[in-house]
Amino acid sequence: MSISVRQITKRFGGFTALDGVDIEIPHGSLVALLGPSGSGKTTLLRIIAGLESADEGSVRFDGEDISNRTARERRVGFVFQHYALFRHMSVFENVAFGLRVRPRSTRPSPERIRARVHELLDLIQLGNQAQRYPSQLSGGQRQRVALARALAVEPSVLLLDEPFGALDAKVRLELRRWLRSLHDEVGVTSVFVTHDQDEALEVADWVAVMNQGRIEQIGTPDEVYNAPASSFVYNFLGNVNLFHGRVDDGTAYINDVETGHVAFVRPHALEIARKPPSGTQYFRAVVRHVNAAGPVAKVEALTDWGAPVHVELSQERYRELAIRKGEEVFVTPKDIAVFAKEQRAG
Amino acid sequence: MVNAIASAPPIGESAFVRRALIATAVLFLTAFLLTPLAVIFAVAFGKGVQAYLASFRDPDTLSAIRLTLVAAAIAVPANLVFGIAAAWAIGKFEFVGKGVLVAFIDLPFAVSPVVAGLTYVLVFGAQGLLGPTLAAHGIRIIFAIPGIVLATIFVTVPFIARELLPLMAAQGNDEEEAALTLGANGWQTFLRVTVPNVKWALLYGVILCNARAMGEFGAVSVVSGHIRGLTDTMPLQIEVLYNDYQFVPAFAVATLLALLALATLLIKSVVEWRVGTVKGNAG
């Protein structure tokens, strides 16, 4: 089922959580709503689910306006950040809940319910934990049960609110890959909220970057990462070095008279040399700290004008240079993105 | 356990201070709680089991027991409905005047029961605000059973709501919202999710409420009028018998209330243990 959100606005008292948001979510896709806390992403998800009502705008499922339908009537599967499993019910009863509360006329027989629940428990690889209680499961297992419970009612769309937010890093990584393969298997239109850019970029077909109640950019992970539409998106997705400066006739002058421009350079788009490179622009910096543990070596240096600059080098290049703390190096930006400074605060 | 106490903990008092504190607490409890409790049973059975049982053949006493049961049977369900509704509203929703409502629920704790009883007399009594209107329609509230029931409800209002409130507020709305998105309607959500989640606190609240409803003296005393065999509840009957120097019957009826108190404590301990283990598991 496709989801279409049109001009949704939501205020909480004097605070505008969503400010005229539009988004089209194609059928069968997996979309990430990515943004910092307070950007409105969870509110948007809850409005799509019908758990919150919008002040203005409409939500359509397959073109049909469902803004006035209750959460119950929308038939969405919702997965909560803190699982929201029914604590007094076993895993089996949790997953069966959505089928048990159906009106008698559409309720499956007990045998059918049993079969369906076990099918789902096998899908989430918890087939042997059916009689356990949520409190006896790990965080990752609980979230998988929550997912199975949401899928049991064959929802038209699946909505996940920071589904991995409460899990530790390793489980999170494992579970998001599992979610991706589950989505490929089940194929239900899914929207998930996250503040973790790695998660969004790795899992989603489409990423909608949100900031201050607006959507800054919607695109494939490749698009939002490599062609950010605004300085916010550039800044939010991955690490950046930020230089203030001016733009004159197509040339950016950093650390010059400030005329309202900012230049962004990703740490891996900076080249370090021990001698001033010829035929290209560069600036001097003094190495302050080196961290070579990990796939890349991270160098923190201080520029002449006192700004810290972060550079990532391949381990090979790092060994070749053999730079140490306190040494002077010459830094060349290979790829700069320049944006006019945003008028809005933040 | 013994070792834990014997070896001095890193933070704490010396063994002497700890033993002194424990001894003080035990002495205090013995002097002010256990001894009176023992005295009740000693006097009640002082003239033998026959005399004890004979106390319950007095029609006035039987009527008092019956009235107490009736008052509790109305007050407890009334407060059950109100308590759940109030705790749900306060614990799970934001609305204007929430603080005022919480304060009102606590009012019966703050107001002397005698004052509460007097207010009812002032409102419903013969000289009261609504007295003439009620009298014209032949309705009698003060010095009759309805007054006793009303006074009992008033003094027991906070018990169930107060037990449920913190728990419901702590549990939040997530599970209810989950039930809703899974297609459950309001009643299904309430009966299958909300109530099971608070069942132990609810039971505890009901027990406390019941104990207080049966034991209430002050407010009931003011509105009852002390008509023997008609408007005397158990606590009032105990006073009447005692003032008549009928010590065995007085203490015999008192044993019933004492047993109720002991049963309440026992159930309370079981419930607290249950709630404790559930919380422990939830970790």
Image (tube, coloured by chain):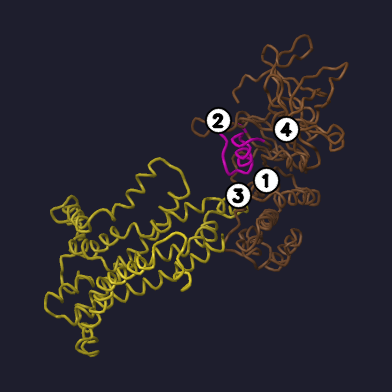
- The amino acid marked with disc number 3 is Arg
- Taking depth in this image into account, of A164 and B229 the one nearest to the observer is A164
Quarter the C terminus of chain A occupies: top right
Between circles 1 and 4, the one closer to the viewer is 4
* Colour for chain A in the figure: brown
Q: Secondary structure at mark 4?
A: loop
As for residue B220 lying within the magenta part, the answer is no
Looking at the image, can residue A7 be seen?
A: yes
Q: For mark 1, give the secondary structure.
A: strand
> Disc 4 marks which amino acid?
Asn
3 and 4 marks in contact (CB < 8 Å): no
* Percent of width and height locating residue A313: 82, 33
Chain B palette colour: yellow
Query: Same subunit under labels 3 and 1?
Result: yes
Question: Could you say where residue B15 lies in the image, as x and y percent from the top left?
Answer: 39, 68
SS category of the residue bearing label 2: strand
The furthest residue to the top = A249
**Displayed quadrant of residue A5:** top right
